[in-house]
Image (spheres, rainbow, N blue to C red):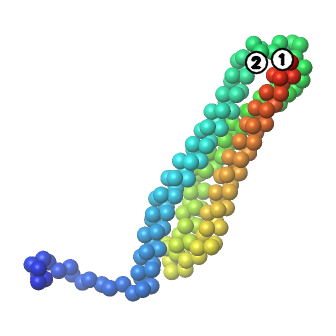
């Protein structure tokens, strides 16, 4: 069977009700979110984690290798400050690695997707969108990831300052 333009007509073209249209749009938005959000957020977290990891490990490695060229460790004052900076730099590395593990865990990923399904009212939340609760769940997971990043950065900064103070106290 052909239509007036000589093309085959589709079997049955179904009109969507407004509710079905809204559901269809919500499912499309969810798919866009789950595809784009996961990639963008993961890339940003990985970049920050990589930078802090590189800086912390670099501080620790360069310090261990070259501190004796700057300061005579046998007569150095406040050697505990140097040790403290090494412990903090090492702790920063461990926190970055723990944060990366948390951010990439299946539980975290599944939690974000479940929250997105809830926000858009798709999947097991079909027809019952709750944007506020879904966003709150996503924010809770992001807060967990961000907490690791904040702590690793703080530890790195304190380690760097401690090491600079140690060097300044022993050079001047």
Along the line of sight, which residue is nearer the eye, 109 or 149? 149
Q: Position of residue 57 (x, y in %)?
A: 67, 30
- Looking at the rendered structure, which numbered label has been put on residue 34? none
Q: How many marks?
A: 2
Q: Which residue is mark 1?
A: 171
Query: Whole-percent x and y of residue 80?
Result: 87, 26
The residue depicted at 55 percent of the width and 80 percent of the height is 128
Question: Dividing the picture into quarters, in which one does residue 11 lie?
Answer: bottom left
Residue 79 can be seen, yes or no: no
Q: Secondary structure at mark 2?
A: helix
In the figure, residue 2 lies in which quadrant? bottom left
Callout 2 touching callout 1 (CB < 8 Å): no
- Name the outermost residue toward the left: 6
Tell which tag, 2 or 1, sits nearer the viewer.
1
Residue 141 position in % (x across, y down): 64, 59
Q: Which mark is residue 67?
A: 2
Q: Is residue 86 above or below residue 48?
A: above
């Amino acid at each position: 069977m052909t239509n007036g333009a000589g093309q085959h007509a589709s079997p049955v073209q179904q009109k969507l009700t407004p509710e079905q249209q809204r559901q269809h749009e919500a499912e499309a938005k969810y798919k866009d979110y789950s595809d784009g959000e996961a990639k963008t957020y993961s890339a940003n977290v990985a970049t920050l984690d990589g930078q802090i990891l590189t800086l912390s490990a670099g501080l620790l490695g360069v310090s261990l290798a070259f501190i004796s060229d700057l300061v005579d460790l046998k007569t150095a004052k406040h050697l505990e400050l140097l040790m403290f900076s090494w412990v903090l730099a090492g702790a920063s590395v461990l926190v970055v690695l723990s944060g990366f593990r948390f951010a990439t865990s299946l539980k975290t990923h599944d939690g974000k997707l479940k929250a997105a399904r809830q926000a858009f009212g798709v999947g097991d939340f079909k027809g019952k969108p709750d944007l506020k609760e879904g966003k709150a769940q996503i924010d809770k997971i992001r807060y967990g990831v961000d907490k690791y990043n904040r702590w690793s950065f703080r530890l790195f900064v304190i380690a760097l300052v401690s090491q600079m103070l140690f060097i300044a106290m022993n050079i001047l």
